[in-house]
Image (cartoon, grey):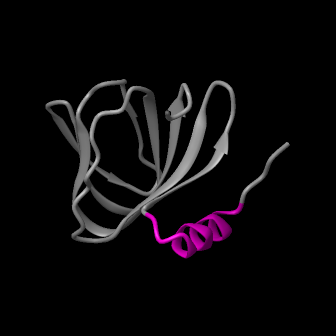
Amino acid sequence: MKAFRLDELEAERVANDGAYLQFLRERTMSVGLYALDAGQLDPQKPHKEDEVYFVVSGRGSITVGSETTQVGRGSVVYVPAGVPHRFHHITEDLRVMVVFSPPES
């Protein structure tokens, strides 16, 4: 079993000066913590893997393909592989758990 604490993951992400911290990688998936601060632009490009986003905290919007929705704590968003997507209009610092399947390459 592997167990993680969000506060420790956030501290590790900050210490590594990155917006994304991958903290679990297995044969069929990888999981990371993604951070975007209020007003920040999301530089993502489409991925080769399916993704599930779980918003841990914050508020903003996400556009997936041609659909846009507001997200906040507790939101879950599925993004199929290859589909353009990005967070925007971030009004409160976003902390998002990201699951890639297969693992992010």
* 41 versus 81 height, above or below: below
- Seen as rendered, the residue at the extreme right is 1
* 60 versus 66 height, above or below: below
Q: Along the horizontal axis of the image, is 54 left or right of 58?
A: right
Let me know if residue 14 is in the magenta part: yes
* Front residue of 74 and 51: 51
Q: Residue at x 63, y 64 (%)?
A: 9
Q: Residue at x 57, y 75 (%)?
A: 15
Q: Along the horizontal axis of the image, is 95 left or right of 91?
A: right
Quarter of the image with the N terminus is top right
Q: Residue at x 60, y 31 (%)?
A: 29
Q: Position of residue 64 (x, y in %)?
A: 24, 35
* 63 versus 105 height, above or below: below
Q: Which residues are magenta?
A: 5-18
* Front residue of 56 and 50: 50
Q: Residue at x 47, y 71 (%)?
A: 17
Q: Along the horizontal axis of the image, is 18 left or right of 2?
A: left
Predominant SS of the magenta segment: helix
Count every numbered label the image shows and give the total: 0
Let me know if residue 83 is in the magenta part: no
